[in-house]
Image: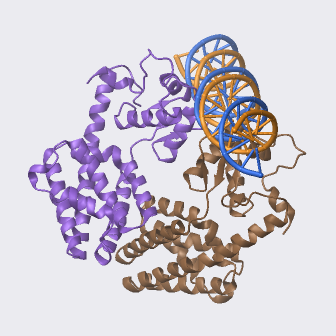
Chain colours: A purple, B brown, C orange, D blue
Amino acid sequence: MSPSQRQLGQRPLGQPKPRPENMADRIYQALKEQIFAFALLPGDRFSETEVAERMQASRTPVREALYRLQKEGFVEVQFRSGWQVRPFDFEYFEDLYDVRIVLEEAAVQRLCDGEQQHPAFAELLAFWLVPPELRLGDGAEVSRQDERFHNLLIVASGNRQMAQIHWEISEKIRIIRRLDFTKAPRVEATYNEHGAILRAIVRRRTDEAKRLLRSHIAASKAEVRKITLHMLHSARSRAAQGQETAID
Amino acid sequence: MSPSQRQLGQRPLGQPKPRPENMADRIYQALKEQIFAFALLPGDRFSETEVAERMQASRTPVREALYRLQKEGFVEVQFRSGWQVRPFDFEYFEDLYDVRIVLEEAAVQRLCDGEQQHPAFAELLAFWLVPPELRLGDGAEVSRQDERFHNLLIVASGNRQMAQIHWEISEKIRIIRRLDFTKAPRVEATYNEHGAILRAIVRRRTDEAKRLLRSHIAASKAEVRKITLHMLHSARSRAAQGQETAID
DNA sequence: TAATACACACATGTATACAAGATTGGATGT
DNA sequence: ACATCCAATCTTGTATACATGTGTGTATTA
């Protein structure tokens, strides 16, 4: 693995202060990317000053970014004793998967019962009900589209706040959800299962649609646990092989 | 109404700096209370400096508090142009009521299907299944206990994250939900309906329990809209009668 | 040698100073 | 009289200085 992997967020030292947008937003994004890339491992401890120096900024926007990440559950602060990346808690993720099942089943129920004219639903049909030769192959892109599929189900059901809450859940589980699309068979299965769910909704077969959806999400939930453990292990190995890092 | 109502958050000027806890937390609480008491009306605009002076603090903790309130949907910031209390949006609140229905129905389903041994469930039975002479009369207290009833349903179903999300929803709708308990009949109805729901769950009559729950929440949702409009109107009248205030 | 106490470095929490853009009000020109 | 332009003021965003509590390492003592 390239050593530059551990230098995410470092701005090239040439230009003085490009400041393309909000400093706080930049730092928020960069920190989140580092956590997602396992460049910051769960359990790692760090200080605001340390992050500020890496990002070439002051503590003020760093603190703002950290508080946002804290509210989203990625980091924790100990009173006057530094921050740490929140350790993995599989019950946490599995609970969130179950909330997804509840929300998305409710959305499917409403779609089967009522109107299916929402633009979001049209987009779903156009994207996922395509012949196999038009399917995407890139795992990361399919992962993004999978997230979009499930969120658009909620949007199409017409409840904005439910869609917002579902989106926040997606943000929280994305760090492990991506790992589900690192294998080609899972990508193909995703296309098939999404297609089946949509066809059942169009035909208003409520129970079948809900059953298909439930097992589709449950499959991801079951798969993700072992993949995550593997990824965490290899990330720790890489970190130990590279520069010395507090692992715990 | 007493004029001191509009001076919430003012610390008595005697003691120099009591600082009982986090400044940022104090300001967060005080601002939230002002918004809930309609001392800050939806649409009111204000600046960080203004709040800092009222709270006798610097802008730093004020900003932290405001960002928290922003994430929770109570205030909004306009780029370099001040903050404002988020205007009321009834679709927003009604969407949240519908999310509550979805989450709580799912919890009832799990309670009817599975174990009912969770301590939270025992507390529910002990509090709500009491003879009428032991019931509370204070509207504000019953409002708090109503919130607790619905949240404990989720807790008892065993999904911590669902309970967390449900709690965040409760925080958002509390500002209008309280208004539903300003009349005595609603208090009595709440006792009756909660009792009926619990009895149906104990007897594992799933459909009946879900039906009762759904109509119970729907009743609140329907009631709240007109009460809120009335309260907003009278709060604006009071503000106009008192000192001059930006109304919109 | 082991345990304890103390001092120093460092952590976050808060206050203040500075930067840059948005708004507003008045002055000016038509 | 009305519209337009410009400057002063006010806004948030960022940097930095200060306050206060925590933890650790070392020195001292039993």
Q: Is B29 situated left or right of A7 in this image? A: right
| Residue A89 in the image, given as x and y percentages of width and height | 39, 48
The mark tally for this picture is: 0
Q: On screen, A43 above or below C18?
A: below
| Front-most of residues B195 and B174 | B174
Residue drawn 14% across and 51% down? Answer: A188
| Front-most of residues A123 and A210 | A123
Q: On screen, B224 above or below A230?
A: below
| Residue A77 in the image, given as x and y percentages of width and height | 55, 39
Q: Is B124 situated left or right of A231 in this image? A: right
| Front-most of residues A158 and A102 | A158
Q: On screen, B98 above or below B64?
A: below
Q: Does any portion of residue B115 appear in the rendered image? A: no
Q: Quadrant of the C terminus of chain B?
A: bottom right
| Residue B86 in the image, given as x and y percentages of width and height | 61, 57
The answer to which quarter of the image holds residue B146 is: bottom right
| Residue A48 in the image, given as x and y percentages of width and height | 55, 29
Residue drawn 26% across and 47% down? Answer: A143
Residue drawn 36% across and 30% down? Answer: A39
